[in-house]
Image (cartoon, grey):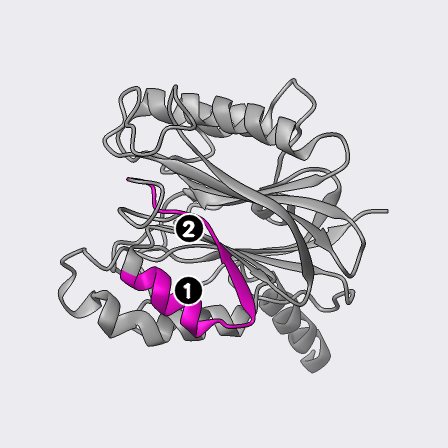
Amino acid sequence: MKLRFLLLALFCALSLPGRSDPPTLPKEALRVMSFNVRNSGAKDGGNDWKSRKALFEETIRKFDPDLLGLQEVLADQHDEIEAMFPDYTMVGVARDDGIRQGEWSAILYRTSRFEPHRSGNFWLSDSPEEPGKKAWDAACVRICTWTALKDRLTGGELLHANTHFDHVGTVARINSSKLIGERLSKLAGKEAAVILTGDFNCTEDDAAYKLLTHRDDGLTLADSYREIHAERSPDEASFHGFKPLIAGSRIDWILHTLQYKALDAGILRSEGSRQPSDHYPVTAILQRLP
């Protein structure tokens, strides 16, 4: 009876959605995190950036991602985060002017693991090369940042893209999904795998999600979380607004092409009342297939 209890406890511990490691990992496993940082300009009282940035850094270091997609990063945060993580290379521009005005959807990659090839940005609008343009029914300017890398451990080519969809515009989210799918397919070509991270401001019930995960143009994107947690739970919220909230659906996703399979995926929830952001970071551990 005691052995049965211990085995059951072990099974439950390994099944928690927030755990960061499956029982065993191959050395080439790729650790990916997506994290909306909550911009430093928000009036959050005791949850302002200054009060939580140490926990933010600790949260990232604890998971230790190889690839990290951040959203809502303002210029002061950009500079602090870049200084926090000197072992990473930071990629991206601010969305309002293509330089430092407005929010970044920045990418950080582990410099020792990846050989950079090229990187760029496009705006989620009908003029994707034009910085600062609001489009469709969006409330804000929106951007997608990408970087093409070679994984030194596997030798595989990889395109990581990171974005933040509009929180108001339904049409904007749908058109953003279409644009991102088309752009990533062209940027990746036939060889490179694709990983897409972001705050998509909608759930897997929405058309924007379905347009990304059920494409008919050869770019097939799998949802890493749903690979691991096949049965949908009522407690999958990734946005909490600094409240003790877990009920709800994910709006933050890590999607990938079929050159990878998910070994693990989670929603990381800090213990206690203090949270590093108004979103829980989401994570995935991916393995490159031969």
Residue 191 belongs to the span the image colors magenta: no
Classed neighbour count for the residue bearing mark 1: other residues with Cα under 10 Å, few (<14), some (14–19), many (≥20): some
Q: Nearer the viewer, residue 108 or 217?
A: 108
Count of residue discs: 2
The spot of residue 193 in percent (x, y) is: 70, 40
The spot of residue 32 in percent (x, y) is: 58, 56
Image quadrant where residue 57 sits: bottom left
* Vertical comparison of 117 with 77: above or below: above
Distance between the alpha carbons at the discs numbered 2 and 1: 12 Å
Q: Which residue is mark 2?
A: 235
The spot of residue 254 in percent (x, y) is: 54, 46
What's the residue at 25%, 54% (across, down)? 241
Classed neighbour count for the residue bearing mark 2: other residues with Cα under 10 Å, few (<14), some (14–19), many (≥20): few
Which residue is at the far right?
290
Q: Amino acid at mark 1?
A: Arg
Q: Which residue is mark 1?
A: 269
**Region in magenta:** 76-96
Left or right of 16 in this view: 176: left
Q: Nearer the viewer, residue 148 or 170?
A: 148
Q: Quadrant of the N terminus?
A: bottom right
What's the residue at 69%, 73% (across, down)? 7
Upstream in sequence: badge 2 or badge 1: 2
Residue 87 belongs to the span the image colors magenta: yes
Image quadrant where residue 245 sits: bottom left
